[in-house]
Image (cartoon, rainbow, N blue to C red):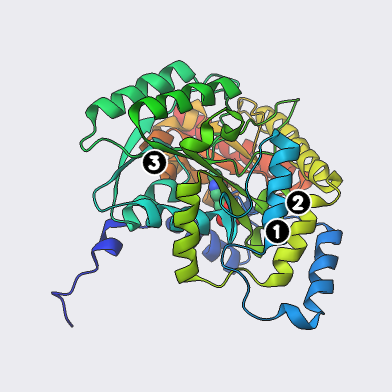
Amino acid sequence: MFDEIRFNTIERLPNYVFAEINEIKLNARRSGEDIIDFSMGNPDSRTPQHIIDKLIESANKDKTHGYSASKGIYKLRLAICKWYSRKYGVDIDPDREAVATLGSKEGYVHLVQAITNPGDVAIVPDPAYPIHSHAFIIAGGNVHKMGLEWNEKYELDTKAFFKNLKKAFADSVPKPKFVVVNFPHNPTTVTVQKSFYEELVAYAKKERFYIISDIAYADLTFEGYKTPSILEISGAKDVAVESYTLSKSYSMAGWRVGFIVGNPKLIGALQKIKSWFDYGMFTPIQVASTVALDGPQECVDEIINTYQKRRDVLLESFENAGWKIDKPNASMFIWAKIPEVAMHLGSMSFAKQLLTEAKIAVSPGIGFGEGGEGYVRIALIENENRIRQAARNLKKYLKSLEKSKDA
Ligand SMILES: Cc1ncc(COP(=O)(O)O)c(C=O)c1O
């Protein structure tokens, strides 16, 4: 009925590439198979106890059950500012330069909706966390994709980045208004140094565009690497905002808490649009998040430690199984080039075979854009024993591939 009535926004959104893998995974589980699941960046550990305790204490109060503040309660915005000051030495105004969001994804989508005019162009690296580009499609804008290059230590090739960025500016009509960056990067784990942001901020001022930086994985770093913030660059607030999430560092993914800070014009736009969309997170969640950001931080070290150990066990056991992968120094992922013997399959068929033949679920690189082809993303959300089991399954599968190649 009503075939002539079309929903343009929905039609412009692609089907979810991971849906196919998810369906095979669910069907296998329903038929009783044990699937080792490395597919989603969904932390498996429990939220630290002191944060849960604060949630319960606050929920037991009489005055915390009504509508909250859509931009976040003042106390939480203050804790966000303190977090930036402690971690990066950056001053943020809690009223004009900070918004607490229902997870950083909600904040990002609404920010993009608030600041994008129909037809506006955003430059987004490819591969990317899918919403980084699709938020602009939802908002009626367009995306100009740009390749990302890195070395064997998953460090950004900044020279190539700025060459590609300049080419994107030269090729794009109309001129791009926004550039999205996300380091440590999902899915590739690629990291940058502070000097990268110096160059990016200078270029933004020259070409007159805004930068949206996503540092969801800021804390999940290893071997002494420290994630820089774009806001550490003097004058960055003139052109940039940055988002962070409590989902990863504090294992609070289901709580839906994040924030965006920086340029007051963009933050004002986000505050305004959010005031039309929501009444803010449940107040006890905001109070507990204040304690997460401002309280003892040993829990973050424990979470980092868990991911680091899993990374090491996975790299070692997978190498023994016949799949050598470069070592990342950030995030909760491993971005793995498909082994030579399976390269001809491409990332989607390889991920499907890993699932059906080795009972291992990973995300095919193609799901993150054409630039992700040739790779799969492995999320470190299974424990060390399960990782070793995955390696045993993998060994058998890779051997069978070798055999069929020789036959
Ligand atoms: C790069 C990046 N940004 C943002 C998010 C969203 O996090 P949340 O909405 O839980 O804060 C994710 C989730 O995986 C992510 O990978």
Q: Compared to 365, does 275 lie above or below?
A: below
Q: Where is residue 382 in the image (x, y as percent from the top left)?
A: 71, 49
Mark 3 CB lies closer than 8 A to ligand 1: no
Tell whether 4 sits left or right of 189: left
Give the Cα distance between marks 1 and 3: 35 Å
User: For the residue labelled by badge 3, is the local secondary structure a helix, a strand or a loop?
Assistant: loop
Going 59% across and 24% down the picture, which residue do you hit? 194
Q: Where is residue 330 in the image (x, y as percent from the top left)?
A: 65, 33
Q: Which comes before the other along the chain, label 2 or label 1?
A: 1
Give the Cα distance between marks 2 and 1: 9 Å
Q: Compared to 279, does 314 lie above or below?
A: above
Task: Residue 75: name its quadrant.
Answer: bottom right
Q: Write down the residue under mark 3.
A: 369
Type of the residue with mark 2? Leu
Image quarter (top left, top right, bottom left or bottom right) of the N terminus: bottom left
Q: Residue furthest left?
A: 4
Is residue 77 something that shows in the picture? yes
User: For the residue labelled by badge 2, is the local secondary structure a helix, a strand or a loop?
Assistant: helix
Task: Residue 100: name its quadrant.
Answer: bottom right
Q: Write down the residue under mark 2.
A: 293
Few, some or many residues within 10 Å of mark 2 (<14, 14–19, 20+): many
Few, some or many residues within 10 Å of mark 3 (<14, 14–19, 20+): some
Type of the residue with mark 1? Leu
Image quarter (top left, top right, bottom left or bottom right) of the C terminus: top left
Nearest the eye: 124 or 26: 124
Q: Write down the residue under mark 1.
A: 76
Type of the residue with mark 3? Gly
Discs 1, 3 touching: Cβ within 8 Å: no
Tell whether 167 sits left or right of 348: left
Going 83% across and 66% down the picture, which residue do you hit? 54
Q: Compared to 146, does 138 lie above or below?
A: below
